[in-house]
Image (cartoon, helix red, strand yellow):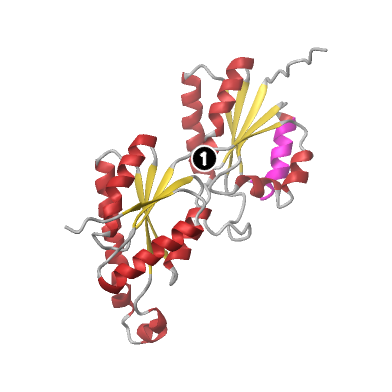
Amino acid sequence: MRMPTPVYQNILVPLDGSDVAEYAIGYAVDLARAHHARLLLVCLADAIDAETAQFPLAVAQLTCQEAQARLQTLRHQLRAEDIEAETRVIGSAEPRAALERLIEAESIQLIVMSTQGWTGMLRWVFGPEIESALNALAVPLLLVRPTTYKIVVPLDGSNWSESALPQAKEIARAFDAEVILLHVFQSPASGYADQLALAGQQEAAERPYEDMRDTLIALRNTLRREGVRAREQIIRSNNPAQAIIDYVESEAGVSMVVMSTHGRTGISRLLMGSVAQTVLKGLRCPVTLVHPRRD
């Protein structure tokens, strides 16, 4: 017996303002063209408290005004491609209930949704019991896993650690990837923070942090001028290797780490080599090790 082909007239795409969430739009567009369907782009704004949801790396959520502006841009782009598109903003503290009401009110036949987003959208919308919540949905759910490419380059402030940048730049160009310049900041006076604050020397203690931030920004700007997407990231930790591993595992879309096998000279050089070895053993994604030239 030939099975009937489902017909979709109204397709809903939940969004959260992130690029990885918007990755689902391409799949929804293909279905909309095939079925002459209408797309309903729905953005979650002011809906969930990041701390309560236990997503420590989540970025700040969109305000309703920001969500409206982003949805309007997407709608104009889709309409320019002859795709019928409407937009809605959900600002409810109970996004799942609001989404269910919207599905019924708009006669939605299919949801197309990214499995990743800066806001951990699946868990935020459907709660911790994701599987049971998905089974309770009244319409089919097409889950799309984003294919994003990010290259993390750990830097320690030395020219030797920066020798990994040319290799990372070429890989980024080949795969249209984003380069993340990562520094793990270890305050030399971390054990004396309270005493320094009482002595009025906290600003001096933070100066190395600001210096490193300026260095990363300069490197970032150089990469951008050369046509490579790049951003900087500084995290505080007294365990650089584990901090790099934790960051890479938590950052959606990281496809590779490119790093120097050595950093500064002397003891720091030995430490950077040890960090590289630990990162290599602890990560699941590929790690490209660059041996600095002794010029």
Q: Please, is residue 221 above or below residue 201 in the view?
A: above
Looking at the image, can residue 220 be seen?
A: no
Asked whether, in this view, residue 295 is left or right of residue 21, the answer is: left
Q: Please, is residue 138 above or below residue 120 in the view?
A: above
- Taking the magenta stretch, the answer to whether it contains residue 193 is no
Q: How many labels were placed on the picture?
A: 1
Residue depicted at 69% across the width and 39% down the height: 99
Which residue is most to the right? 1
> Which of the 4 image quadrants contains residue 109?
top right
Q: Please, is residue 251 above or below residue 235 in the view?
A: above
Q: Give the range drawn in magenta.
A: 92-104
Residue depicted at 53% across the width and 50% down the height: 61
Residue under circle 1? 20
Q: Residues within 10 Å of mark 1 (few under 14, many from 20)?
A: many
Q: Please, is residue 48 above or below residue 210 in the view?
A: above
Q: Nearer the viewer, residue 124 or 116?
A: 116
User: Percent position (x, y) of residue 131?
Assistant: 74, 45
Q: Quadrant of the N terminus?
A: top right
User: Percent position (x, y) of residue 108?
Assistant: 70, 27
